[in-house]
Image: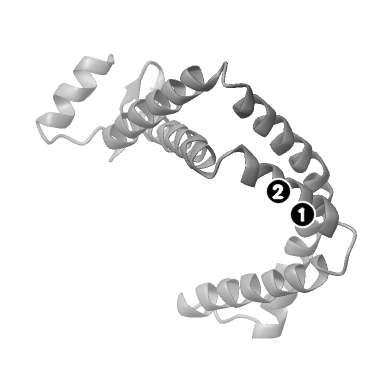
Amino acid sequence: MGLFEAWSLWWQGKSLQGLKLWGLPVLWVGRVGKVMSFVGSVVAVIHIIGPKRIREWARRTRRHKGTMFWIPTVLGLAVFESFVYATYYFGRGQQSGSLGARAGEVALVFVPLAAVMYVALGAVDKLVERMATVMESGRWEPVVRWSAFGLVIVGFSFDLLAS
């Protein structure tokens, strides 16, 4: 099915669930649209924040990376995730196991993930510094701005088709 046919069906109020757009299930086209909208929106927010503040954040992140700052953050997130996980399963009536067992399961998943995030921050702060440099040059600003706008519009329309 093509894009115009999909929009025609959507305007008629028919569900596109189970159909394919360009060979992909419409559900996946909608998911790709959500990602496109998110990326375009993040670019817009980064542009609003500005290169000076972005560079300051990268320096602060680099400075705190080796300190005790991360231990309470990781533990707090682990406790929060454990609570959400346990609430979800207990709320659905799946009460096999105690709250402590559920929290332990989350810790087994979340703590390694937090360690990966900690290591990845080394790369993220360098990427953010590079973004700030590109933003300060001004050469790519119109291209980035219009690309972000296009991502949001096209992504939103794909997401809308999947609804």
Q: Give residue 128's position: percent from left, percent from top.
A: 70, 38
Q: In percent of the image, x 78 and y 66: which residue is there?
A: 108
What kind of residue is marked 2? Glu
Q: In terms of secondary structure, where does tag 1 sit?
A: helix
Q: In percent of the image, x 62 and y 37: which residue is there?
A: 51
Q: Nearer the viewer, residue 52 or 18?
A: 52
How many neighbours does mark 1 have within 10 angstroms: few (below 14), some (14-19), or many (20 or more)?
A: few
Q: Which residue is mark 1?
A: 60
Question: For the image shown, how many numbered marks are present on the structure?
Answer: 2
The reply, left or right, for residue 132 in relation to residue 15 is: right
Q: Residue 18 falls in which quadrant of the image? A: top left
Q: Is residue 117 visible?
A: no
The reply, left or right, for residue 119 in relation to residue 84 is: right
Q: Quadrant of the N terminus?
A: top left
Q: Give residue 162's position: percent from left, percent from top.
A: 31, 36
Q: In percent of the image, x 75 and y 75: which residue is there?
A: 104
Q: Which residue is mark 2?
A: 56
How many neighbours does mark 2 have within 10 angstroms: few (below 14), some (14-19), or many (20 or more)?
A: some
Q: In percent of the image, x 51 and y 40: which residue is there?
A: 42
Check the image and name the residue furthest to the left: 12
What kind of residue is marked 1? Arg
Is disc 1 in contact with disc 2, using a CB cutoff of under 8 Å? yes
